Image (cartoon, rainbow, N blue to C red):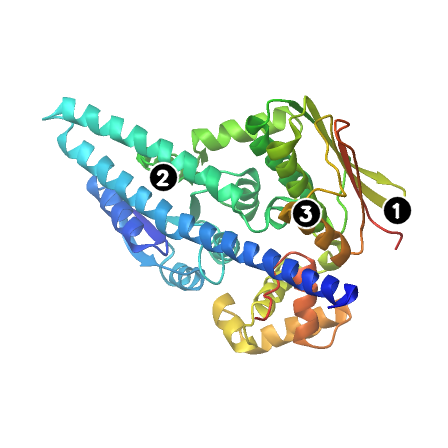
Amino acid sequence: MPLDVLLVEDHAIVRDGIRSMLERGGEFRVIGEVETGTEAIQVCKRKTPHLVLMDLSLPGLDGIETTAEILRHSPDTKVVVLSMYDDEMRVMNAIKAGARGFVLKRASLADLLDALRTIAKGGSYLSPQVSDKLLKRIQNGKLHGPQQSSVISGLSPREVQVLRLVAEGKSSKEIAIVLDLELETVRSYRKTMMKKLGVNNAARLTKVAVAAGLTHVEMSS
Amino acid sequence: MGAAATGAALESVVAAFSEARRRERERLAKIIHDELSQLLTATGLELDLLKLDIKETQPDTAIKLAASQDSLERVFTRLRELSREVDPDPVGRFGYTQAVQKLVERVRPNLSSDIDVRHCDGAPSQARAFYTVLECALDNIVRHAHCRKATVATRREGQLWRLEVTDDGVGFDTETVNRGTGLLLMLFNATKEKLDLKIRTALGRGTIIQLTSRMP
């Protein structure tokens, strides 16, 4: 019986190629293609795919946050991350979020099938370039994560998500849609966050987000 | 125009230049990621599928396709390197220490000299300004210093953080040299973040650039 795969990738030309590759041999069946993390979470709640192939750079909720959300609701689903970048931080964050594999976008995606097969059987997979880099870093004792800014260290991961989206100019309603939460829940997160940070409006929240590196300042022209 | 007004106007120009540079990097990073790399990935996938189609009937052609993919892979590798060079916020992405390590690794092949990097744990709270000053200092070393040895050291001294970039190169005369964008950006970032910037240099005597945070 083929394994059900959900494709989460916002570039159609890449999705088309991956779908063609996956469906060649009959091992895998693509049950859905979505372009955003929010859509991915909704599909996983309805369909519970065996595997999710997740691009890291997505509009709105990114691939890391989406991975964590999907696994919160569907712990049996296995997420395989696909990314153009091989830097250690992305790999570590993907693994910490629960991804079982990290495949590098390259001129050949022949190892994508190997990755999916391995992970479907319960294993994990890192593209050779990625694992080589990580090993070197570990050997040199240079595998550090960026320290989270002390300004926001008291916030929960969910509150950090909400803070970033507020700083990007999204309303509570828009944030509720992106994170697939109730509006009242988002409002409650905002209230708690403001109390923890000692601020009382969105402009000050944005300032905190910029200082913490969650987003950057746009200069007015 | 009085001196104060001239200074304010210059600061305004440097601020605008700094923001324009950040925006341009963001634009280029987006093109590299959203357009070029996705096109390359899709092309690579099409070649993979073509190889699978013909590998039994035309194995020699399949080998030639694999060679084309090797060429594409070299383009991909270079694109990744470029994307790191134009990253608008490496400190935000990697943290200060790793961002500095990656910057030095990138610069090292362009230097005929040795470059020694020393870090301590942690990072200054104005890490982005420290990074920008370092980036400008290293750019100047690559382009002008003709040095045998350079050193980058970030350390904590009590409540202060200090960045020191030294080289044993040709130095420059601060009175006569035209202030290029590098020096102006260093001054701008130091002033904006209320950091102390000292540049000690003389012709033939190398250069020491020192950036220090102030007591809170």
Q: Amino acid at mark 2?
A: Leu
- For disc 1, the chain is B
Q: Quadrant of residue B177?
A: top right
| Residue at the spot of label 1 | B159
Q: Residue, x 55% and y 76% (percent of image)?
A: A171
Taking B123 as reference, is A114 above or below it? Answer: above
Nearer to us of marks 3 and 2 is: 3
Could you tell whether B49 is left or right of B134 in the image? left
Question: Measured along the vertical axis of the image, is residue A52 above or below residue B11?
Answer: above
Q: Nearer the viewer, mark 1 or mark 2?
A: 1
Instruction: Give the image location of residue B40, x and y in percent.
Output: 32, 42
| Residue marked by disc 3 | B179
Q: Is residue B63 visible?
A: yes
Q: Can residue A144 be seen?
A: no
Q: Nearer the viewer, residue B123 or A95?
A: B123
Return the chain for callout 3: B
